Amino acid sequence: MKEELEKRVAERTEELELKNALLHESETRYRDVVEDQTEFVIRWLPNWEYTFVNGAYCRYFETTSEALLSKSFMPRVFAEDRPSLEQVVASLTPEHPIGSIEHRVYRPDQSIGWTHWTIRALLDNDGQVEGYQSVGRDTTELKIAADTIREKEVHLAHVLRLATMGELVAGIAHEVHQPLHAAKTFAEAARRNLEAGLPSGIATAIDCTKEISEAISRTAKIIRNVRAIATSRPVELKMLDINRIVQEAAGIIAFETRRAQVEIRFELAEGLGPVQGDRVQLEQACINFFMNAYEAMANTPPGDRLILIRTCGTESQVEISFSDTGCGIDTSNKDRLFDAFYTTKPQGMGMGLSLCKSIAEFHAGQVWAESNTAGPGTTFVLALPRSVTPKENLTP
Ligand code: ADP
């Protein structure tokens, strides 16, 4: 029996040694994988202290694991981004233990880099968080590329605004001419009345000056609008009243509306609440929808040319729709409409809707087209979230 027992113990020991060797081998392989990869891998305690850092992470920060372990990694995180990191970490639960974040870091040369992380909460047997593991990578170059593209888009948007202005210039000249002509007529009337020297003439002359002042204000407003559209300026995100934006956009192209013999009807939601956005960009998107609708209705009988502007909102977003009674769209091309250079017009540039899409995306929103069901024509919808997130969208 003793011999038998010793034999079994020996067998069992051999078995355990083999398993240990396999475990060791697998741990070494795992460590090599973690060490050799270019992704950063770190583990840390709820008080932010490192418990593990891999080689890629150390190389990026030009340091060693000995220098990092037991220290907090927070000082490496860009100060302004620490609250968002804390928020993501606090949101991790046993049911949703994984989160992600892109935040800035201080690099060894004191420059600022961007990093993207997937964070997993590590739970003990009771479901309590005992630490976290983050896997990340440097996204600085991607960020710079995205910023360059955005800058180019802002520049392109300006060029296209100038192109739109070019199309509108005859109308604008006419718009300015009208109040100026009125002002001249009233000024002459005032002079005639004053020259006559009658007391009643003085009262009439005073009325004339009020009309002149009114005409000058109208002219100044038109010029202000033109300047706002034509001037190259940085993007400015503010809380905006979308109902006002569509009405102002309609005001800017009022002459074009009359020329195209189109009726604009507004069905604007009351108490819509504000949306975060750039006024000029959003006005430009509206102008593009208007201009496209006018062109689409060129063959619609004048009495039937109608654009219905509707706004509606929920707690999280606002929608503006532009429904026309024009030629309609080929639904199989519905998504191509928003591609750059897609046009069905002989003189078209195919940039209007593409720009609307960029503007929507800049505002973290969406834009789409639908064929009208109750009648002819198309409806374009611009949906904008109440607030533009993520934060990096704030820099054009
Ligand atoms: P462009 O107006 O220079 O052609 P856009 O990007 O503004 O460029 O429009 C792309 C195409 O989308 C147009 O050529 C037209 O075929 C279609 N489209 C745009 N708006 C409308 C509309 N309201 N009704 C019908 N088709 C439209």
Image (tube, rainbow, N blue to C red):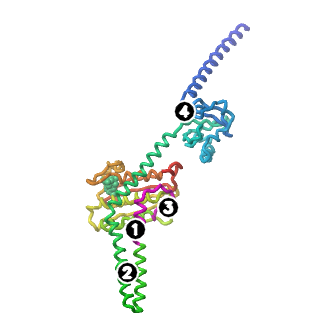
* Quarter residue 20 falls in: top right
Rendered location of residue 201, percent (x, y): 39, 89
Say what secondary structure mark 3 lies in. Answer: strand
Q: Nearer the viewer, mark 1 or mark 4?
A: 1
Q: Nearer the viewer, mark 4 or mark 2?
A: 2
Q: Seen from this angle, which residue lies furthest top?
A: 3
Rendered location of residue 143, percent (x, y): 49, 43
Q: Nearer the viewer, residue 354 or 138?
A: 138
Q: Quadrant of the N terminus?
A: top right
Q: Which residue is identified by label 3? A: 240
Disc 1 packing (10 Å; few <14; some 14–19; many ≥20): some
Q: Nearer the viewer, residue 206 or 349?
A: 206
Q: Seen from this angle, which residue lies furthest front?
A: 195
Camera sees residue 361: yes
Q: Earlier in the sequence, mark 1 or mark 4?
A: 4
Contact flag, marks 3 and 4 (Cβ < 8 Å): no
* Quarter residue 230 falls in: bottom left
Contact flag, marks 4 and 2 (Cβ < 8 Å): no
Q: Amino acid at mark 1?
A: Ile
Disc 3 packing (10 Å; few <14; some 14–19; many ≥20): some
User: What is the CA distance from the residue labelled 4 to the residue labelled 2?
Assistant: 76 Å
Say what secondary structure mark 2 lies in. Answer: helix
Q: Which residue is identified by label 4? A: 39
Which disc is residue 222 wearing? Answer: 1
Q: Which residue is identified by label 2? A: 187
Q: Earlier in the sequence, mark 3 or mark 2?
A: 2
Q: Earlier in the sequence, mark 3 or mark 4?
A: 4
Q: Amino acid at mark 3?
A: Leu
* Quarter residue 258 falls in: bottom left
Magenta residues, start to end: 218-244
Rendered location of residue 157, percent (x, y): 40, 53
